[in-house]
Amino acid sequence: MQYKIYNTLMHLVHWVIILASVFGFLLTNYLLIYLLLQFLILCSWLGYGFYDKRWGRCIITEIQWNIKDAYKLRPETESYIQYCLKYKFGINSNESKVEVYIIAIYAITFIAGIGRFYEVLP
């Protein structure tokens, strides 16, 4: 029962972060918060990655995987998106391609958010 609660909460946190990261640049009144979120994601990928010597690691994913480890349910993949594609949506995909797409979407939306913040983009 505890596992289900923790795991569900971590899924919720993940999806809130993912959706806010992908679509947050559209919300003009919240661009500063959006840019802060994007910066924190970058810090997680690079900062935690540097500390852990595994670049691109997400702190939230690491917490969720530790919860899964405690219950002997850790997935094979290191990527939360890859995990969702494979285990939740039944889509088998190339993990390295998925990572490239994630980085590309992140970069495009972050640049769009910066452009909108500085009113370079509509």
Image (cartoon, rainbow, N blue to C red):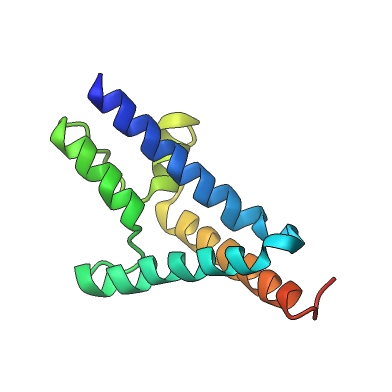
| Residue 78 showing in the rendered view | no
Give above or below for 64 relative to 88. below
Depth check: give the residue in front, 121 or 118. Answer: 118
Left or right of 32, for residue 118: right
Q: Residue furthest right?
A: 122
Residue drawn 24% across the image and 24% down it: 2
The C terminus lies in which quarter of the figure? Answer: bottom right
The N terminus lies in which quarter of the figure? Answer: top left
Give above or below for 106 relative to 13. below
Depth check: give the residue in front, 111 or 24. Answer: 24
Q: Residue furthest top?
A: 1
Q: Quadrant of residue 106?
A: bottom right
- Pinpoint residue 101: horizontal percent, then vertical percent: 55, 59
- Pinpoint residue 72: horizontal percent, then vertical percent: 15, 32
Residue drawn 31% across the image and 46% down it: 77
- Pinpoint residue 41: horizontal percent, then vertical percent: 45, 64
| Residue 87 showing in the rendered view | yes
Left or right of 78, for residue 31: right
